[in-house]
Amino acid sequence: MTRLSLVLRALVTTLAALLAATAAPAAAQAKTDPRAPEDFVALSRVAPSIIQEMRYTTRHNFVGERIDGYRQPLCILTRPAAEALRRAQLRLLSQGYSLKVYDCYRPQRAVDHFVRWAEDLDDQAMKAEFYPNVDKTRLFADGYIAEKSGHSRGSTVDLTVVRLPARPTHPYTPASPSCPAPRRTTSASPTTPSTWAPGSTASTPSPTPSTRASRAHSAPTGCC
């Protein structure tokens, strides 16, 4: 196992434990749209060095259009979750890496948008890039899409780890070969990319807790 594999395995296990421990109580859950709860914070104020690429404010995502409820490319989380990411980021920076986040708090309107898209089986415009090996009729059954999301509690985050210095994110244009599809990584194989694929959801049985945790808290790397 490479040094990077060991680093990522340890980081993912630690980060998953921290985020699980900081899951927002009922009082801190999203109550109404479009505003998030008052006790949420902008990640950039707590950990400004963490790279952000908030995909759902753009068309470059599996739906292929800007997602309802995302007004600004801003990561907001409960303060305990943001602090957990800050501590993980400090460990990574010392080893030449950085966290990169793609999605944080997710309003219910966005979840509803995903559900409408998943129910429209004729809309598969982004399949080649984001889910080439996944049957869209299986998105609900296999756990890719659900009517409720842990993101709406504010303590779930989609992220990956990138080596520093990070490559700049290029403006997205449809069918552009310069920006590869977002990819998922796991602690068992941190440098092995894949798009949505059978067995990649957090609920899929896995031989190790660290791999399950990584599936729950890792996300497409995309253009990094």
Image (tube, rainbow, N blue to C red):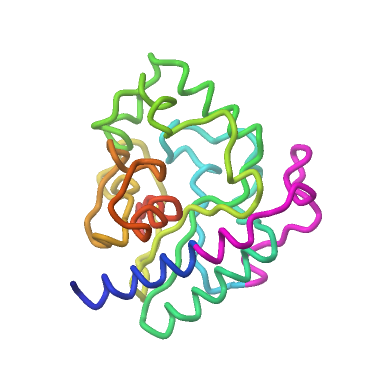
Q: In which quarter of the image is the C terminus?
A: bottom left
Q: Is residue 77 above or below residue 95?
A: above
| 51 to the left or right of 219 | right
- Image coordinates of residue 211 in percent, x first then y, are 33, 56
Q: Which residue is drawn at 35% across and 66% down?
A: 167
Q: Is residue 61 above or below residue 11?
A: above
Q: Residue at x 81, y 54 (%)?
A: 38
- Image coordinates of residue 27 in percent, x first then y, are 80, 49
Q: Which residue is drawn at 67% across and 70% down?
A: 45
Q: In this view, does 72 lie above or below 46?
A: above
Q: Is residue 192 above or below residue 149?
A: below
- Image coordinates of residue 181 in percent, x first then y, are 31, 45
- Image coordinates of residue 19 in percent, x first then y, are 56, 61
Q: Which residue is drawn at 44% across and 51% down?
A: 216
Closest to the observer: 26 or 70?
Answer: 26
What count of labels does the image hold? Answer: 0
Closest to the observer: 127 or 90?
Answer: 90
Closest to the observer: 18 or 51?
Answer: 18
Q: In which quarter of the image is the N terminus?
A: bottom left
Read off the magenta span.
17-46
